Each structure stands twice: as C-alpha cells, then as structure tokens.
Amino acid sequence: MSLTLQFVPYAEIENLSSLGRIRKLLNAVKEGKIVLLEGRLKKEEETELIKTTMEEINSEFKGIELAVIYPESHNLDPLKKMRHQFINALLGDRRGLTIVGPASIVKEIKKDPNKIQLFTTDGPKKSRKKKGSD
Amino acid sequence: MGSQVGVGAADAYKINRKLYKQNPRFVVSGVIKKGAAMIDFFKKFVRKVFKDIFRKKRNLKIGIYGPPNGGKTTLANKICMDWLGEEMGLVSNIEHETREIQIKERINIKKDDNELSFSLVDTPGIATRIDYEDFMKKGMDESDAKQRAKEATKGVIDAIKWLDNMDIVIVVLDSTKDPYSQVNITIIGNLAARDIPVLIVANKVDLRKSNINKIKAAFPQYDVIGISAKKGTNMEDFYEALFVVAG
C-alpha cells in the first residue's frame, strides 16, 4: 500500500476564507491524501472542520484523523508570549504543523509533547501459504 | 469600467462589512479581516462582561462534553441521581450511545451555604471519524449500524452547535486513554476561545490503567478532578470544583 503526503504551505491558505481552507483540506483528504499543513487553522476552523467532516460522512468517506503539533507557549515568558501573539495576529499562525488524513487510511495519530506517531490501517490481509514438506 | 472603480477605503470597508454580516465565512480581504477581528474582539468582550454579570443571576447551562465513551452520560446520571433522584440517559459500552442532546432542568446542588442552580446538558461524544462497520464489529446488524452512524454524525454536529449556548462546560476524559487526542485539544481550545469556564474531569480513576497525571500534564492551565462516575468516587471534590468554576 502506498501513501501520498501532500504538503500545503501556509501561503496557500493564507488568503482563503475559513470555508475555503476547510474545503481545500477536506478535498485533498477525500482523494486519499495525508495533508501536512504548515501552521494551524484557527480554533473555530478546527471545530468547523470536524462539523463539515461529519456532514460529509457516508459509506465511502469514514471521517478524518487530525493532529496539530504546536510549540507550547504557556511556558514562555509574558513578553515572548505577547510577541508571538502579535506576529500571529499579523501574519497568521504559521507555527506548528497540522496533519489531516482520511480515517480509512490513518487509524490513529498518537501525540505527546515530543513525538508524533501515525498508524495506518491494515491493508488487505494476505493469505499465508503454509510451507509444505513436499 | 466596472462600477467598483473609484471606491475609497471607507466605502470598501462598508461594503465588506455588509458582506461580512451576510456571511462571515466568505470574507477574504485584508481590510475586512482587520475590521472583523476588531469587531469579534469587541463582541467577545461584551459577551464576557454580560456573561459575568448574569451568570450568578440566572439558571446556568452546564454542558458535559468530551470524546465518545469517556463517561459523560454516567456522570450526568450520577449528578441527576444525587440531586434529583432519577437518571438522565442510557449508557452502553458501544460508542455513540448518546446521539441526541439531553437536558435536565432545575438541578439544585447545595454545599454548606452555597447553592447552584443549573440545567444539565449531556451531549453526544465528539469524534472526527464514525464508521458503521465499527458498530457491526460490536454485534449490530448492518442496517442498525448504518442508522447509528447516521445519528451519531448528526449528534456531533448538534454538540458543536450547542457550544455557544453553554455557560460552563465539564469536559469528561477517560483517564485510561491518551489525553493528547486532537478532539480533546480542539474542544478545550474552542471553549477557551469562547471564554467559557471549563472543568476537566478525569473519569474512570477506579481502573488500573488510569493516569490522571497525564491529563494534568496535557492541560496544565486547568483544574483536573479525578473521579469515578460509575462508582461515585470523589464526587464531593467534583461538586466543590463545580462551585469554584461557577464563581
């Protein structure tokens, strides 16, 4: 089984509306691609992505797996935190990485602060041939 | 020449503002983004001030949110049994048992001299994937499984739509599972963005695999209360924390 990873630079979604961003991600996922988006969606857009996904689930499309890797900011000193917030407000949230994949391919994305593991669903099981003794 | 030629920045802003009011999703221009962001900030501020003023005076809506099978309905039942003497909904080992919003009104809880009056809203589990074949693996026939999947997707949509109606949200997480799932982070992030007070409950602490510290580490900015809704463990602390969150 082969996997297709599609990298989407933040510049590609920067000028899109929320609906446009969600559509772009979902269209790629529905084509069976795992999308690696530079940066992250807004919190409201993440919820909207889940909602839109639910609206489109059918016997073919089983949903998505989603993970956002994002540098923690609550450990930063207030000045740095403010600077990050200011940059985010001006340029959009380009920090971090968003991974979205089709549920039919991506079984689970496990995440802890230091690593991310992507588990794919089992492909069709191959029948094992018993080694005969001839 | 098109009629748009010669429109000044102020006019453009007015036009964009009108479009934004009609459908905020489709607005893309920079002028509008800045205008909309300012208005959103102002709206949030006003909403927060009003919420803070009226929170103490009216009947609160407390929502129970979380991923499927975390024990939301078990907790809702426990609260209702403790204070109303009746249960709220059915529980099951199969995911998405609660597929509709359920409300119990006029719950009064008392502790010392404090009293809290609220409506409890139990919501369907929020998920990013729903596969009818998963229900078939648990013994359901195909048509029932497909129906359950259809209702479950609608339940998730309704749960998300109801977020804005909540005054306080109890997020119920299964303490035997990985707390770093994006659904948990998205729900809690959304509540923070909406300025809705959150109480995180680490449920199922009676189980051997339970790890409440992992939940605390995942959400360090929130209070996390470990309970077993099924066995009624630590419910006193839970009610105390609820009073604190309700202010």
Image (cartoon, coloured by chain):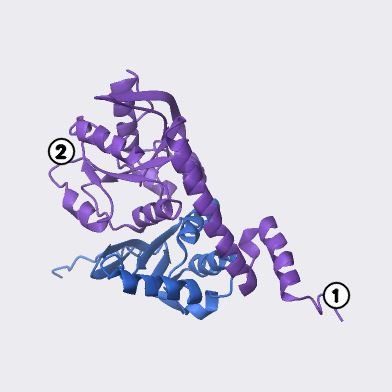
- Indicate the quadrant where residue B178 lies: bottom left
Pointer 2 indicates a residue of which chain? B
Residue B221, horizontal then vertical, whole percent: 28, 55
Q: Looking at the picture, does residue A20 appear above or below residue B100? A: below
- Give the chain ID for the blue colour: A
The image shows residue B132 at horizontal and vertical percentages of 43, 46
User: Label 1 neighbourhood size at 10 Å, few (<14), some (14-19), many (20+)?
Assistant: few
Left or right placement of residue A59 versus residue B234 in this view: right
The amino acid beneath tag 2 is Asp
Q: Amino acid type of disc 1?
A: Ser
Among the two numbered marks 1 and 2 on one chain, the one whose residue lies closer to the N terminus: 1
- Is A22 above or below relative to B247? below
Q: Nearer the viewer, residue B205 or B132?
A: B205
- Which quarter of the rendered picture does the C terminus of chain A lie within? bottom left
Q: Which mark is residue B206?
A: 2
Subunit under mark 1: B
Question: What is the residue that sits farthest to the right in this orientation?
Answer: B1
Above/below status of B165 relative to B4: above
**Residue B25 in view of the camera:** yes
Q: Helix, strand or loop at disc 2?
A: loop
Visible residue check, residue B160? no
Identified at 58% across, 75% down, the residue is A15
Q: How many marks?
A: 2
Residue denoted by label 1: B3
Label annotation for residue A48: none
Residue A78 picture quarter: bottom left
Q: Tell me residue B143's x, y (percent).
A: 48, 39
Chain coloured purple here = B
